[in-house]
Image (cartoon, coloured by chain):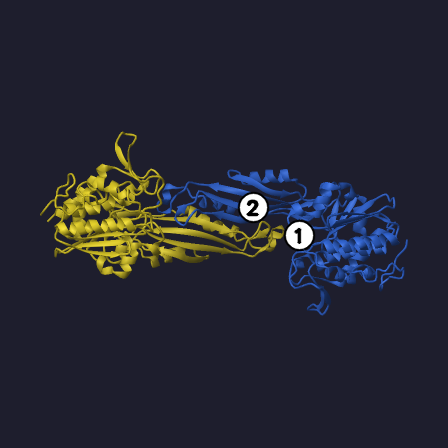
Chain colours: A yellow, B blue
Amino acid sequence: MVITPINGIDDTDGTGDASHPLIPHLGDPVALTRALCDIPSESGQEGALADAVFETLEHLSARGPGLQIHRDGDAVVARTQLGRAERVVIAGHLDTVPIQGNVPARWESDAAGEQILVARGACDMKAGVAMQLSVLHRVPEPSRDVTLVFYDHEEVAAELNGLRRLAERQPDLLQGDFAVLGEPTSAGIEGGCNGTMRVEVRTTGVRAHSARAWKGVNAIHAAAPVLQRLAEFEAPAVEVDGLVFQESLSAVGIRGGVAGNVIPDECVVTVNYRFAPHWDASRAETFLREFFAGWEVTVTDAAEGARPGLDVPAAADFVRAIGGTPAAKVGWTDVARFSALGIPAVNFGPGDPLFAHKEDEHVRPGEIHRAVEALCSWLEDA
Amino acid sequence: MVITPINGIDDTDGTGDASHPLIPHLGDPVALTRALCDIPSESGQEGALADAVFETLEHLSARGPGLQIHRDGDAVVARTQLGRAERVVIAGHLDTVPIQGNVPARWESDAAGEQILVARGACDMKAGVAMQLSVLHRVPEPSRDVTLVFYDHEEVAAELNGLRRLAERQPDLLQGDFAVLGEPTSAGIEGGCNGTMRVEVRTTGVRAHSARAWKGVNAIHAAAPVLQRLAEFEAPAVEVDGLVFQESLSAVGIRGGVAGNVIPDECVVTVNYRFAPHWDASRAETFLREFFAGWEVTVTDAAEGARPGLDVPAAADFVRAIGGTPAAKVGWTDVARFSALGIPAVNFGPGDPLFAHKEDEHVRPGEIHRAVEALCSWLEDA
């Protein structure tokens, strides 16, 4: 097992990479995070960052046992070819939500005087990308074959999502026994995710002039029991593979009304159901149709959740290596795309997710180091 | 008392009016209705019809005891000056809603084989305008002084309404002891009208991502009891001056929702209250604030109703002359503008109001004759 230096810039091999935006920082994951933040990469503009990551992977390939490197648009995939018994995937997205005066990155002190790195993408998820690259830099001959996946368009509409595109075009590139998605989890393991489904629940009536209200049937009044049922429902917490997933059922929109003097003949309540990954979308739809029995229910979109899959050997080893108690991920994330490919997946990355997309988005250096150390320990584990 | 011929065209006085669009038809209120329908007068385009009515009034003035005739935009007012003890106002609007291939007028047979005059404005309210002109033609020296008011922009926004404009600019022209508004009532008396008020009832909450619904407070769920209260409320029927006014309280609009994955922090229900004329707007507002106690209530618009005022002598005589049992008008009409000037007012005109604004709008000749006969009988009454 060869461990490359982790301190300082290691450019003694004469490859001329000293001026590269990322390569000189491979030995310090915090400096690497900052360098990654300083390459703007709002969704749709990931090209420069994808180039820099591709070059960095070529650099790592030249210094290690060799990587198969693929590029698809602004997604990049690198695979070790060590012939190990297991292959693990470590994935992360390159794009960020729009910059709000928070690039380039800057150091600030928090209320407790601790240094924090403030930047767009700092936690979601340039620190995670730094973790991906740092691990392969520090563990060039891991005990499990490693596939690093970097992809574009995670922060925008699902049809643009780079991981979705890769899964459709080149699913073989994503194959593995277990996947880690580097989304921010404060360096704890968050397993699986809830599914999500949106439905429109429609009530109908009969139009009439509101001066003769009794000639009509008011569809908005008819929506009272729909809202009442939602307000009274206590969504369960469901245990799946040892993790507890809190479900929810929420009206996220309501519309109705023709004009200020007309009894409305239609009211539509848009409902978002977040369901634990013991159910697929079909079972969730059945539940909603029973819940709203008597009303017209139309499914407008759905995404299945992901079981945490912590019972596969690579996952169990991962949990042991990271320590702590895994938690259920409440939001839908791209782990579900791995799940759909039959690959158990968890979220694990530095950064507090509550600061994602915020103007004061930031990451703590300690978390970056802790996440990298934990992953390296897992991948060095024989 | 001079009664002018009611059959055929009376142009023997040599005034050269035989080619006028209205004057030759003064003796036949049905032919006059048809002639009025054939002069298009959608709101804002009443000019040609106002000209024709003005000329007809000049014609009537020249043949009778003289009329004071006033014009204000496309509104025309004509007042007899007979020095009678009472003055009655007979008012009607010149405009129609947009034409739908139903001008010029045509004769059709209804299911029972009866002839009906089909045209835009036939019932709302060219037949009423024909009634106004026919009465002065047939009763040039009425037992009560008569003010005929013809006005523009009744079918559009209240701020354009010609009667409102006259009431503001020249209220003296509208003065009288009693007013008849020639809106269609199937030639029955419909007294007064309900008031109308619109309020927005707002529920509030706390935004959160819908994947973490329990971090927020759902404002749409919070609207359930607002709708429930509306659905359960049985609006009373209220007797005012001997007529029964059915009230109503209806949601006419609802809106809420930020995005498909956000717990909404606001939901707004728009409510239309139709209240009997024993209450003014202030009392109606108090009722609504008590009804929706605990929620934010904002009044967006209000128009007070009108008491039927059937106890004044001219009104009592009118009811006696017309016969039948007066009913309460359910919709808000311009009688409320007379009521606001202190003038009791009723709706009375030919035509079934249920066909107003419809593509198959029409009027029955029998109703036109009946309405004219009844008004003439009242105005001949010593």
Front-most of residues B28 and B49? B49
Q: Could you tell me the amino acid type at mark 2?
A: Val
A316 horizontally vs B49: left or right: left
The answer to whether one can see residue B338 in this image is no
Residue located beneath label 2 in the image: B271
Name the element at disc 1.
loop
A117 horizontally vs A379: left or right: right
Question: What residue is rendered at 12% in x and 51% in y?
Answer: A143
Tell if the residue under mark 1 belongs to the same chain as the one under mark 2: yes
The answer to whether one can see residue B247 in this image is yes
Neighbor class of circle 1 (other Cα within 10 Å; few <14, some 14-19, many 20+) is some
Q: Is residue A108 above or below residue A292?
A: above
Q: Are the residues flagged by discs 1 and 2 in contact, CB closer than 8 Å?
A: no
Name the disc covering residue B336, or none: none
A330 horizontally vs A12: left or right: right
Q: Name which quarter of the figure residue A72 lies in.
A: bottom left
Check the residue under mark 2 and report the chain it is in.
B
Q: Could you tell me the amino acid type at mark 1?
A: Glu
Name the disc covering residue B155, or none: 1
B69 horizontally vs B190: left or right: right
Q: CA distance from mark 1 to mark 2?
A: 22 Å
Residue A187, how many percent across, how many down?
23, 42
Neighbor class of circle 2 (other Cα within 10 Å; few <14, some 14-19, many 20+) is many
Name the element at disc 2.
strand
Residue A26, how many percent across, how many down?
18, 43
Residue A3, how many percent across, how many down?
11, 45
Check the residue under mark 1 and report the chain it is in.
B
Front-most of residues B296 and B229? B296
Q: Is residue A160 above or below residue A11?
A: below
Residue A81, how many percent across, how many down?
14, 56
Earlier-in-chain disc, 1 versus 2: 1
